[in-house]
Image: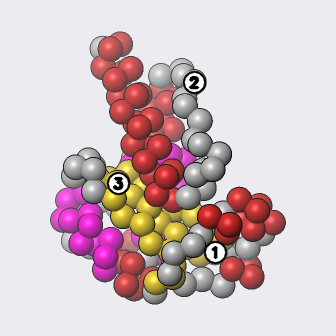
Amino acid sequence: MKIWFDTEFIEDGRTIELLSIGAVREDGKTFYFEAECDTSKANEWVKQNVLPKLNSPQQSRSWIAQQFREFAGEKPEFWAYYADYDWVVLCQLYGTMMDLPKGWPMYCRDVKQICDSLGNPRLTKPDDASEHNALADALWTKDVWEFLTEMANAKA
């Protein structure tokens, strides 16, 4: 099952702390939760662009991890846009990468790499009102993946 996801987080160059995670499966089912987090550590950019979009009850990381495990299933294929930090913060929900649920890959596929391989075509821009909302960004990532996949197939 393909899963496109996005996270919002606080990072300081040493640690990454989850604020929210959003995902959409190829069957259309969505997932969104906000994590318990010390937002006082957020930099100005996060305070201006992300924190105002958080408005759901905060859940514990362990609870989110369990819910996401159920959502993703046993053999997911993960996709994100500029995936590196998103993948790290997702993996950290389970501890180390070695603690990922059985059957999960130890890597995430990056939609930006497809974009690069196709010459960086112009992509739709996320709606300013919803950009940096993890679920809205996950849905946008799925749309971009579909656009790029169609483009790649047309070139084949």
Towards the viewer: 3 or 137: 137
- Identify the residue at horizontal 68%, vertical 66% (top origin): 52
Q: Can you give x and y, in whole percent of width and height, for residue 71 in the image?
A: 26, 67
Structural crowding at the residue carrying mark 3, measured as other residues with C-alpha within 10 Å and reported as few (<14), some (14–19) or many (≥20) = many
Towards the viewer: 131 or 15: 131
Specify which label sits upstream in the sequence, 1 or 2: 1
Specify which label sits upstream in the sequence, 3 or 2: 3
Structural crowding at the residue carrying mark 2, measured as other residues with C-alpha within 10 Å and reported as few (<14), some (14–19) or many (≥20) = few
- Identify the residue at horizontal 45%, vertical 51% (top origin): 138
Drawn side of residue 39 relative to residue 66, left or right: right
In the rendered image, which residue does mark 2 sit on? 122
In the rendered image, which residue does mark 3 sit on? 24
Query: Callout 2, which amino acid?
Result: Arg
Task: Answer whether labels 3 and 1 touch (C-beta < 8 Å).
Answer: no
In front: label 3 or label 1: 3
Q: Which residues are magenta?
A: 66-92
